Amino acid sequence: MFIAKENTLTADTDVCCPLFHPENWNNIQHIWDHKLFLKDSVPEFFHIPLPGTYEKAITRMWNKANGAHAAPGPKDFLLLAHDPSSFKGELYMSVTKEIPGEQTESFTGTFFSKVFEGDYSDARRALRSMEGFLTDNEMISEKDYIYFPYCPKCAKKYGRNYIVVVSQIEPM
């Protein structure tokens, strides 16, 4: 589902997503100072993306970033998803610079990430678990994002899948 097009499947390779290292994201606090993202949106029906819309949006975003020489390297590629409503999803792809004429947002603040095993259908469970974890640790989430490190093909190849919840936090 979320594929860095620079690593697209080819005849000589059977994975497109780099190997994910959960220890780099599990229970980690990130301080971001104007971390830049290209923003796009996709239609959803009760938080379920319409068929093909995520893939098209990601391809569109990657082509814009790549064409503007703002695409991150595979190690720095990050695609965050946020659902502001039941019918709209927002995607945020990390970029290395502003892209003229495109909607970008910079993230500044303290973010906390936690890794869960599962696929897209487990996202709601992961968000609830993160909410409980933050409350237990006296933190409040201002906004939650989800990072899926593997597309479905790579999850199958690697034999497991992950959901990373990234929450912008503030102390209680």
Image (cartoon, grey):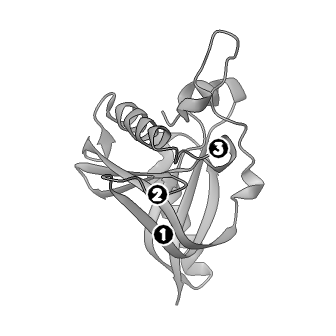
Query: Which element is circle 1 on?
Result: strand
Residue at point 60%, 80% (across, down): 136
Label 3 crowd bin: few (<14), some (14–19), many (20+), radius 10 Å: some
User: Given the current orientation, which residue lies at the most extreme bottom position?
Assistant: 172
Q: Are marks 2 and 3 in contact (CB under 8 Å)?
A: no
Q: Disc 3 residue type? A: Gly
Residue at point 54%, 29% (across, down): 152
Q: In the image shown, does 46 or 40 lie closer to the viewer?
A: 40
Q: In the image shown, does 120 or 20 lie closer to the viewer?
A: 20
Mark 2 and mark 3: Cα distance apart in space: 14 Å
Q: Are marks 2 and 1 in contact (CB under 8 Å)?
A: yes
Label 1 crowd bin: few (<14), some (14–19), many (20+), radius 10 Å: some
Badge 2 is on which residue?
37
Residue at point 25%, 52% (across, down): 86
Q: Disc 2 residue type? A: Phe
Is residue 66 positioned above or below 92 on the image? above
Badge 1 is on which residue?
107
Badge 3 is on which residue?
73
Q: Disc 1 residue type? A: Phe
Residue at point 64%, 33% (across, down): 17
What number is the disc on residue 17?
Answer: none
Q: In the image shown, does 8 or 130 lie closer to the viewer?
A: 8
Query: Which element is circle 2 on?
Result: strand
Q: Quadrant of residue 154?
A: top right
Which tag, 2 or 3, sits closer to the chain's start? 2
Mark 2 and mark 1: Cα distance apart in space: 8 Å
Is residue 41 positioned above or below 2 on the image? below
